[in-house]
Image (spheres, grey):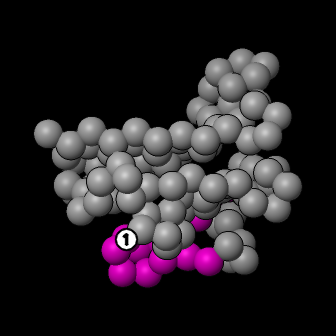
Amino acid sequence: MIDIFCDSTNSSGTIAGVFEADDETSFFYLYQIKPINRIIGVIRLCSRTPDFTESDVDIQWRDNDSKVGLLIRDMLWAVFDVPSERGRVGRYPLEPLNWSEQPQPPH
């Protein structure tokens, strides 16, 4: 059984990037910690057994905490723009993202 969990908070401790994966699916969340706990955004990375381990996963903050990204083996696969609360996902494992790409508008 695979169970992966990784998180990282912004410098003020109010928002977190959270990643979880199991045998069937992987999700990256933008999560508000203060003033109330709530999920702001959700990105599904893939719907299959991960081909990576927890030690391959990293969550990084960029641009004065305005972006939080999910990296697997040092490649960016999902990113949230915190002010707009929009996310973007690559096509894992074929097409990673780069930090300069803009998030998709909501549907």
Badge 1, how many Cα within 10 Å: few under 14, some, many 20+? some
**Near-viewer residue (54 or 97):** 54
Residue 87 magenta-highlighted: yes
Image position of 69 with respect to 97: above or below: above
Instruction: Name the residue at the right extreme.
Output: 64
Instruction: Name the residue at the left extreme.
Output: 1
Residue 73 vs residue 36: left or right? left
Q: Name the residue under label 1.
A: 92
* Quadrant holding the C terminus: bottom right
Residue 36 vs residue 72: left or right? right
Magenta part of the chain: 86-98
The answer to which image quadrant residue 67 occupies is bottom right
Q: Where is residue 70 in the image (x, y as percent from the top left)?
A: 53, 58
Residue drawn at the location 65% of the way across and 67% of the way down: 104
Residue 56 vs residue 84: left or right? left
The answer to which image quadrant residue 73 occupies is bottom left
User: Label 1 amino acid?
Assistant: Tyr
Residue 66 vs residue 59: left or right? right
Q: Position of residue 58 (x, y in %)?
A: 51, 55
Residue 97 magenta-highlighted: yes
Q: Can residue 95 be seen here? A: yes
Instruction: Name the residue at the bottom extreme.
Output: 95
Instruction: Name the residue at the top extreme.
Output: 36
Q: Where is residue 5 in the image (x, y as percent from the top left)?
A: 40, 39
Residue drawn at the location 47% of the way across and 42% of the way down: 6
Q: What element carries label 1?
A: loop
Image position of 9 with respect to 79: above or below: above
* Quadrant holding the N terminus: top left
Image position of 88 with respect to 54: above or below: below
Q: Is the magenta stretch mostly helix, strand or loop?
A: loop
Image position of 92 with respect to 13: above or below: below
Q: Where is residue 10 in the image (x, y as percent from the top left)?
A: 74, 41
